Image: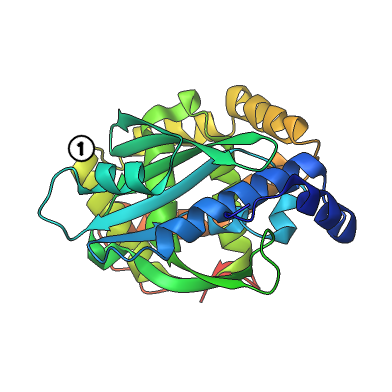
Amino acid sequence: MQNGLLVSHVMEKRKELNIPYQNLLVGCAKEWIIERLVTREDEMLHFYLKRASQIGVKAYRCKNARQLYACVVNFSQEENALEQFLYCTFENVFLEREKDGLSVLIKVPFDKVLVDIRLHLSFCDAKKAQSYTKTISLLYEEGKELEIPCFYPEAEIVEIFCEAYEKMDLFTDMEAIEVVYEYAKTRNMNGKYLTFFLEENLKKSGHTLTAEEMRLFEQAIRGKALRSRYKGYLRNQKRKDPDYEEVIRVLDKLFKPVLQAISRHEIFFGDWMAEVERFL
């Protein structure tokens, strides 16, 4: 087929890479979408991948979530430029407006099956967009590499924190919690950026870091509801790791120094070193 999405190829790669068939099928579908977002000729729309740790062979071995996250910088003066691009780029696409962007259901066309992927697109400021590039070898097209512009980990972590802080024990996005954990374990980060983005987002949302709110938040994070949801998230993916206690241990190290500095109105300059799991 013209788009190169062959079920038979997925079956062959499954054996070669020792990845479950459904996981690899979903992974190939995600890569197919990403390639069309980041290699388009339209320079008015710039796309940046979020949750980059969910893309690649290592992720596909244990995950098959049919969710994809990206942000877009719209340099066009046309209000509907993004919608027009999506309808022109993807044949089977259904759009819904969300609070900060669009929810896009894309039916990715393999030769024998359509694979549903939900693309969550949020609008972002150009200054927060790209901080690094991730290169992957496309699994559905032999010998082809793709350079993927990725969103600031610091800004993405703050977005996830603020959503969890707002929803407390009603927070349901367990993949997001694992994404923050994976960033903390694998990427060095700028503490000053973390502080800046966090202060900015809290101000925008109208939230403050009072002692009582922080107590309630910590109680929610360590509470039964989130713990049970996270265990269910791992169980659905037939995994046991990383367990919730390990995740919370690392996130405590990442967030507490930053939150303490903000609550004391202090300037925070430390940089997060993933290898030693602390700020230096």
Question: Taking 126 as reference, is 115 above or below it?
Answer: above
Choose top left, top right, bottom left or bottom right for residue 65. top right
Is residue 188 in sight in this rendering? no
- Location of residue 60 in the rendering, given as x and y in whole percent from the top left corner: 72, 51
Label 1 element class: loop
Count of marks, rendered view: 1
Q: Going 26% across and 44% down the picture, which residue do you hit?
A: 84
Q: Nearer the viewer, residue 122 or 13?
A: 13
Image position, residue 115 (x, y; %): 61, 36
Seen from this angle, which residue lies furthest left? 77
- Residue at screen point 63% across, 23% down: 224
- Image position of 42 (left or right of 227): left
Q: Which residue: 50% across, 51% down?
A: 33
Q: Is residue 211 left or right of residue 31?
A: left
Residue sitting farthest toward the front: 1
Q: Which residue is at 24% across, 64% downward?
A: 126
Q: Is residue 89 left or right of residue 232?
A: left
100 or 168: nearer the viewer = 100
Q: Report the amino acid beneath label 1.
A: Gly
| Other residues around mark 1 within 10 Å, as few (<14) / some (14–19) / many (≥20) | few
From the viewer's perspective, tell me whether residue 205 is left or right of residue 191.
left
Of residues 241 and 132, which is closer to you in this image? 132
In the rendered view, would you say 11 is above or below 197?
Answer: above
The image shows residue 171 at horizontal and vertical percentages of: 48, 29
Q: How is the image coloured?
A: rainbow
Where does label 1 land, which residue? 206
> Residue 55: horizontal and vertical position, in percent?
61, 56
Q: Is residue 90 at all visible to an observer of this figure?
A: yes
